[in-house]
Image: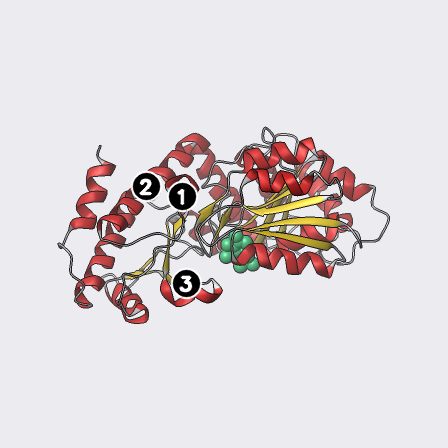
Amino acid sequence: MKGRKLLMIPGPIEFEPEVLQILGSPTTSHVAPDFIESFGKSLEMMKEVWLCPSGQPFIIAGSGTLAMDLAGANLIEPGDNVLVISTGYFGERYAELLKRYGASVKILRSEIGDIVPIDKIEDVLKSGKFKILTFTHVDTSTAVLVDPKPIGELCQKYNVLSILDGVCSVAGEEIRQEEWGIDVALTASQKAIGVPPGLALLVASEKAMNTWKNRKAPVGNYYADWGNWLPIMTSYAERKPSYFGTPAVNLVHALEKSLDLILKEGMENRFNRHHKIASAFRLAIKSLGMNMIAKNDTISANTLSAPYYPEGLNGSEFLSGVTNSGVIIAGGLLGDIKSKYFRVGHMGSVNQGDILTTIGALESALMAADYQFEIGTGIKTALAYLNS
Ligand code: PMP
């Protein structure tokens, strides 16, 4: 029997075998020709995945929080006004992070499970005092999806730099960074990008790079300073050796492979696959009598889902029941409602078999908890949708 359980948390995810194999290859020098080629190609492919042909990509060893830090450290100067649109846990994190760089932060918070209406954002931006706006494309604590397009438009109208936290969205949710006028789109390797944890990834617009170039105050973070990293990215792009901090050699090789697989699938196909699997999962969950945190389908993420436990169900027993059925899912993350819901990741390499297995494991755990429902309802609903 296969001892391994299916990993369905919202990152790290299940990785493609070809990507994992690379991690076991002998580590080369960070100035070896094959590594330089791999780094250079990865930078080129990032621009295609982000749909940002004129952007400046960065690949730096670290987690998603470092990617958030990179944008904050390089773009904020003490006293800058920043508007943070918060749809959950990670919006609050961004506000805290930006304060460290001396930003004066205003937070616009959504109701739990909702987004901040665009006219409310415009009312605040009208004051003309904001230099930067940040928002979380998919907040991993609530599975709420924010539409980046109108936010990008507003930011251009009011000449505000836009930063999209795409840690739980890039390469899963539709992003057209350049067309939508998003200045920074950042992520980490372990989610829809499909590479084990350890890489902070970011693409910055020309406007963002110029803002950094024209800053008066020095960047208050040595490791994150683009002044240290831009020459490295430029060298690798030109296929020349370079050094500032030792790159995560094997992870970069793995990134090249994963980006190649993503582009072979094609961005449109990838967005559609995520949408289809997420829709099937949501329908299945609803057919089992559970409700999502996200208020409606338009603002529901396609990379993960966050359903409330049914009334009266013991959450931790339910989670153990799912694990015992061979699938690992995640508990809640957001403060007050943490114990009332669970999260299922469905991004990256996820396929129909994975989602059906997950629904089966949820049904097994519901049966073990004596929850009253017709066995097979979730599977039946998902299958009907997937084959319609
Ligand atoms: N932003 C979002 C939306 C996330 O989901 C996460 C990770 N769950 C982060 C930021 C932070 O990333 P990391 O844990 O890799 O530092």
Q: Give the labeled residue for mark 3.
A: 332
Upstream in the sequence, badge 1 or badge 3?
1
* Label 1 close to label 3 by CB (< 8 Å): no
* Label 1 close to label 2 by CB (< 8 Å): yes
Q: Position of residue 93 (x, y in %)?
A: 59, 59
Identity, as a three-letter code, of the amino acid under mark 2: Ser
Cα separation, mark 1 vs mark 3, equals 18 Å
Q: Position of residue 171 (x, y in %)?
A: 48, 41
* Viewer-proximal residue among 97 and 58: 97
Q: Position of residue 310 (x, y in %)?
A: 27, 61
* Viewer-proximal residue among 256 and 230: 230
Label tally: 3
Q: Examine the rendering and report whether any part of residue 280 can be seen.
A: yes
Q: Give the labeled residue for mark 1.
A: 302
- The answer as to whether callout 1 falls within 8 Å of ligand 1 is no
Kindly indicate the quadrant of the structure image that contains residue 61. Answer: bottom right
Q: Would you place residue 234 above or below residue 228 in this image?
A: above
- The answer as to whether callout 3 falls within 8 Å of ligand 1 is no
Identity, as a three-letter code, of the amino acid under mark 3: Gly
- Residue 279 — which label? 2
Cα separation, mark 3 vs mark 2, equals 21 Å
Q: Secondary structure at mark 3?
A: loop
The residue depicted at 63 percent of the width and 38 percent of the height is 122
Q: Would you place residue 257 above or below residue 324 in this image?
A: above
Q: Examine the rendering and report whether any part of residue 197 can be seen.
A: no
Cα separation, mark 1 vs mark 2, equals 8 Å
Q: Secondary structure at mark 1?
A: loop
Give the class, few, some or many, for how many residues have Cα within 10 Å of label 2's Cα (few <14, many ≥20).
Answer: many
